[in-house]
């Protein structure tokens, strides 16, 4: 019996490593295929030559497509998809709600409002610091203001409360969405650009934005992974967490702050891409990830695969045109959300109805 107990953690750890390895391999394959496909197809051999230092064997056109378009786009898709899925896992864990997603704090709507104001004011084409567009900066400012408003309202009692934070996020998100509608009504000339930005796209990704997203992912996700055991404790309730030495208010404040930074960077870089943070944590949990640390790591990898694959379809189905990736993820995620809602209602009825 003692030998079996000692071997069990190793067995569990080996399974997790295997899952991570498989997910990482699938991600690399998806990124390689996505780099090849588009309005101009590139051979997989050219990708291999590029990454093995044989750029002199490639044509100038191929190099330009890879460096300026395909590789930044694929990298951004992986980083944003992974971040959205990881934030979704955190939200579902900390709010103890399987239908929570990254948009519950209103950060997405705040970023969209900031970007809309930048577009209306004519700053969307401006380059700030030689790197970022005015839309990107406007989205970041909008996210920061929204985050500040949510946390000021939620901390009126001196503590971060889950219900107060959730309700504040929903209310402020509604206000921001209403303001966007008002702006679009009074500035019809810019309506198309605002609407297209809100649908989400990876087409304008640059290596500078990829680097910013990479730094945000590396820092915020590392800290979230370190704090993952505290999130698991929070799921047990405030009183239980306190008896185990975890202060729910401070832990929740730090975790939601890190999540908000990640989400703000995602929305600023690509616009609003919905449902990734809702469906991926459930898929990961289906494959046996229960602890938050494992769930975060696997959610990041699976979310990266999901968004890269969605973007591949978005840029090839109507080539040489392009489908809005936010619309594509919504087409996949919305039916899943309805199925999840019906499943939860059936479960709540207990013995009366069997799922």
Image: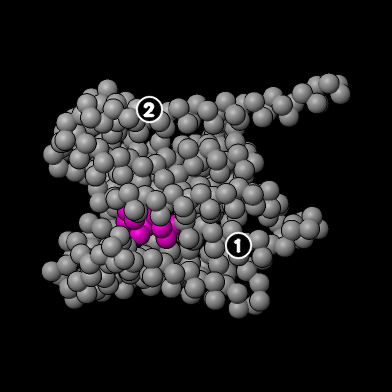
Which mark is first along the chain, 1 or 2? 2
Residue 209: numbered disc: none
Q: Distance between the residues labelled 2 and 1?
A: 35 Å
User: Which span of residues is magenta-colored?
Assistant: 263-275
Q: Residue under circle 2?
A: 29
User: Does the magenta segment cover residue 270?
Assistant: yes
Whether residue 282 is visible, yes or no, is: no
Residue extending furthest front?
56
Q: Residues within 10 Å of mark 2 (few under 14, many from 20)?
A: few
Question: Percent position (x, y) of residue 234?
Answer: 68, 55
Quarter of the image that includes the N terminus? top right
Q: Circle 2 sits in a helix, a strand or a loop, which is it?
A: helix
Is 93 part of what is drawn in magenta? no
Q: In this view, does 184 lie to the left or right of 297?
A: left
Question: What residue is drawn where x is 28% and y is 62%?
Answer: 130
Asked if residue 44 is positioned above or below residue 285 in the image, the reply reads above
Task: Please name the colour scheme applied to the rendered image.
Answer: one colour
Q: Position of residue 64 (x, y in %)?
A: 20, 40
Q: Identify the residue at the far right of this view.
A: 2
Q: For residue 40, what is the image quadrant?
A: top left
Q: In this rendering, would 146 be left or right of 225?
A: left
Residue drawn at (77%, 60%), measured in percent from left and top? Answer: 242
Identify the residue at horizontal 60%, vertical 47% (top origin): 225
Q: Where is residue 310 in the image (x, y as percent from the top left)?
A: 32, 38
Assign a secondary structure to mark 1. Answer: helix
Q: Quadrant of residue 313?
A: top left
Residue 196, horizontal then vertical, whole percent? 22, 56
Find disc 1 in the rendering and name its residue.
254
């Amino acid at each position: 019996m003692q030998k079996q107990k000692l071997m069990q953690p190793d067995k569990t750890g080996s399974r997790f490593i295997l899952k991570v390895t498989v997910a990482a391999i699938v991600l690399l394959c998806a990124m390689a295929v996505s780099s090849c496909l588009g309005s101009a197809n590139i051979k997989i051999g050219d990708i291999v030559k590029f990454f093995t230092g044989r750029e002199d064997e490639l044509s100038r056109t191929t190099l330009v497509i890879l460096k300026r378009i395909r590789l930044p786009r694929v990298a951004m898709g992986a980083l944003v998809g992974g971040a959205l899925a990881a934030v979704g896992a955190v939200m579902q864990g900390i709010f103890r709600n399987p239908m929570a997603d990254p948009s519950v704090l209103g950060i997405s709507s705040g970023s969209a409002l900031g970007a809309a104001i930048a577009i209306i004011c004519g700053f969307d084409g401006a380059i700030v610091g030689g790197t970022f567009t005015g839309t990107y900066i406007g989205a970041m400012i909008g996210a920061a203001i929204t985050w500040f408003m949510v946390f000021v309202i939620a901390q009126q009692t001196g503590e971060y409360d889950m219900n107060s934070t959730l309700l504040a996020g929903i209310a402020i998100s509604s206000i921001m969405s209403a303001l966007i509608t008002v702006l679009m009504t009074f500035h019809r000339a810019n309506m198309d650009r605002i609407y297209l930005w809100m649908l989400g796209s990876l087409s304008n990704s640059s290596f500078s934005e990829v680097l910013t997203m990479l730094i945000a992912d590396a820092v915020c996700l590392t800290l979230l992974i370190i704090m993952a055991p505290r999130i698991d404790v929070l799921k047990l309730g405030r009183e239980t967490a306190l008896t185990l030495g975890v202060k729910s208010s401070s832990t929740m404040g730090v975790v939601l702050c890190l999540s908000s930074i990640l989400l703000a960077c995602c929305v600023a870089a690509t616009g609003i891409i919905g449902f990734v943070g809702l469906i991926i944590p459930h898929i990961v949990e289906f494959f046996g990830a229960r602890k938050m640390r494992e769930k975060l790591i696997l959610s990041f990898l699976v979310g990266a695969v999901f968004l890269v694959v969605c973007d591949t379809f978005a840029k090839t189905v109507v080539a040489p045109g392009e489908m809005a990736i936010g619309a594509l993820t919504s087409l996949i995620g919305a039916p899943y959300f309805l199925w999840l809602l019906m499943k939860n209602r059936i479960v709540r009825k207990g013995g009366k109805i069997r799922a």
